Amino acid sequence: MTWWSKVDLSESNFYGAFFHVLSLLMAVCALLSSEWILIDEPALNSTAGSDDTELFFDVSQSDHCTNIGCRDFWRPARFGGFLDRKGRTHIAFHSNDRVLLDCVTPMVANLFYVLIALCFIITLTSSLSLIMNLLPPPNGFLQWLRRNTVFEMCNMLLTLCVCVVALIAQCEVARVRPHCDVSLGGGVFMVCLAGMMSFFAATSTLRHS
């Protein structure tokens, strides 16, 4: 009750809180998205097409690798490797009832684990900023964080880190599948929108103060 009595609701920034709600929703949607990297396969897949007879793996049990996202890495994943009759190495990725052949490498999986961690931090900082905009801290360190938009700047920096890591993952997938058109999908753009909402929230906070 003592802390609540010190809260001045006249200092609440509802516009900033609204932008933080949008930032939080975008980050959560990105975590649940399975379309961070989009893969446009040619009409005849070089792995699942003419080389089927050269594999010791039943290709019919694998799925078409058309998209990869954070959602594919929420559950424990496992990898399998084998050689075909021509001595070429193939990697099978098993997760979420999906089997992707020559698509996800351990490096790609590690990069997506980093992306999940970054998005989780964005959701956490957006939640804290939302609370502090609705219930402004009376004084001390939390008030300094709010007035100087520290969390908002952290979110914008994290957004930049997400874009860099996603680009590295895109290049790795493109290296594994050189005959496919690999591009960034909606998950990355959702995080970019979250960073943009954090920028608007920071602008609103600075004007309010």
Image (spheres, rainbow, N blue to C red):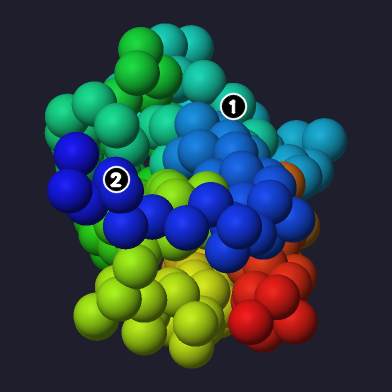
Residue occupying the point 30% across, 25% down: 95
Can the viewer see residue 181 in this picture?
A: yes
Dividing the picture into quadrants, the one containing residue 81 is: top left
Q: Position of residue 169 (x, y in %)?
A: 47, 66
Work out whether mark 1 precedes mark 2 in sequence or the reverse, and give the earlier one: 2
Q: Is residue 29 above or below residue 129?
A: above
Is mark 1 in CB contact (under 8 Å) with mark 2?
Answer: no
Q: Quadrant of residue 58?
A: top left
The x, y position of residue 173, in whole percent, is 51, 60
User: Looking at the rendering, in which quadrant would you find the N terminus?
Assistant: top left
Q: Secondary structure at mark 1?
A: loop
Residue 114 place in picture, x, y as percent = 30, 62
The vertical placement of 63 against 126, above or below, is above
The residue lying toward the viewer, choosing from 138 and 27, is 138
SS for dot 2: helix
Residue 180 in view here: no
Q: Rounded to the nearest whole Å, what is the CA distance between mark 1 and mark 2?
A: 55 Å
Residue behind mark 1: 64
Relative horizontal placement of residue 42, taking residue 202 as reference (left or right): right
The label nearer to you, 1 versus 2, is: 2
- Name the residue that disc number 2 marks: 4
Indicate the quadrant containing the C terminus: top left, top right, bottom left or bottom right. bottom right
For the point 24% across and 80% down, which residue is it?
A: 140
The kind of residue tagged 1 is His
Q: Is residue 195 left or right of residue 122?
A: right
Residue 160 spot, x, y in % from top left = 55, 80
Q: Label 2 amino acid?
A: Trp
